[in-house]
Image: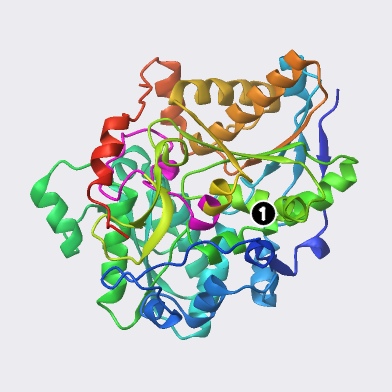
Amino acid sequence: MATKKFLLDESRIPERWYNIAADLKSPPPPPLHPGTHEPIGPEALAPLFPMELIKQEVSSERYIPVPDEVREIYRLWRPTPLIRATALEKALDTPAHIYYKYEGVSPSGSHKPNTAVAQAYYNKQEGVKRIATETGAGQWGSSLAFACSKFGIESKVYMVKISYDQKPYRRSLMQLWGSSVVASPSEDTNAGRQVLAADPESNGSLGIAISEAVEDAAMREDTKYSLGSVLNHVLLHQTVIGQEAIEQMEMAGEYPDVVIGCAGGGSNAAGLMFPFLKEKLEGKRKTRFVAVEPASCPSLTMGEYRYDFGDTAGLTPLMKMYTLGHTFMPPGIHAGGLRYHAMAPMLCHLYSEGYIEAKSYPQNPCFEAAVLFAQTEGIVAAPESSHAIRGAIDEALAAKEAGQKRTIIFNLSGHGFLDLQAYDDYLGGKLIDDHYPAEKVAEAMKSLPVI
């Protein structure tokens, strides 16, 4: 069976981002001030973000226009292809139809530029000269470096140390696009120095790197902070993925029974899911939505739905999330973009309301799925994306066992050409399947604020 690609021309790049907040039956719990535990207003975020992004963060408007300047840069890679995985279907001998939205065609090789370009644009509009951020596996850091280079903005990236060491070529990408990159925890901030004083060999975490980037931005008048996942405006920008996918599924003559995304902070899962979720919220469809996370960082499947900090040092507002605790120190798995202690509050709210399901897998079954995908579909997926592939394969096998025709779509959020060390480790039998212990979650909950 021949590969089936569903392509849109440049005129079909979405002109609006979809804001799922407009269609929720109940709003998610608001962010709280860490000292007073009272809901915060937009002014509390002004030191970190440009005002237009703050407005988007709290907006209840259903659609927000995509600026022409942003759409023009999107044209470098958007619309991205929707591909039916016919060779994978054949290998699985399944009646299911499997589709994937391939975001690895962007300049940085992942979905992250969808929001990086938008955030850089709004910072430029407000005269910001410099942006500080963090990155886990490097997809976000390289995407923001690319976006800042497009708008002439200086950037500083705090890269989680284990990934700084494991993924040197993602660091090279950031530097190629003009960004300054340091391993986190670093000596550049108080937050980093405190971690290093307690543990000089710390591998770092996204929570620590966020603390460093937030501190950096707060200490300089010319600098704002940028986040690659978790927050509402980030998820909003990613909905270009799902909007294109809806149109492409119409071209294919199908509608998904199951929508799948890997989940760390939540941005790529939400980007594909939210436009499809709109019809479920309106009672028009019964589509299932599955977020797939690592068994070593299982915030949805093992975390508690509590108010917690988004960072390790406690510099951010309190957000209600499924969390493993902001003191969480993740194992050094190769899926560095999924090593976060919590999850996007909007995604967590939908999970708590029963609109989204969650699964977790250890590393080896995910890499097994990614190898099969590479051998059948020809694409080497990022370790993060391998979780979505695993979820899609298991859904297809379940359809086979049940003798059901099932239409599945997942977000292939990035390629793995800069992650080949991870594949070498898998093929060499060196990967460890970490399962995060429940007792560590219980212990971490003791450090959470009592709300």
91 shown above or below 159: above
38 shown above or below 343: below
Judge from the rendering whether residue 417 lies leftward or rightward of residue 281; answer left or right.
Answer: left
Residue in front for this viewpoint, 7 or 294: 294
Would residue 229 be seen by someone viewing this image from the given angle? Answer: no
Q: Position of residue 344 (x, y in %)?
A: 49, 54
Q: Is residue 292 magenta?
A: no
Q: Position of residue 409 (x, y in %)?
A: 72, 38
186 shown above or below 330: below
Q: Amino acid at mark 1?
A: Phe
Choose top left, top right, bottom left or bottom right for residue 168: top left
At x 63% / y 53%, what residue is drawn? 271
Which residue lies most toward the left here? 197
314 shown above or below 442: below
Residue with the mark numbered 1: 274
At x 72% / y 15%, what residue is drawn? 91
Range covered by the magenta-colored residues: 324-348
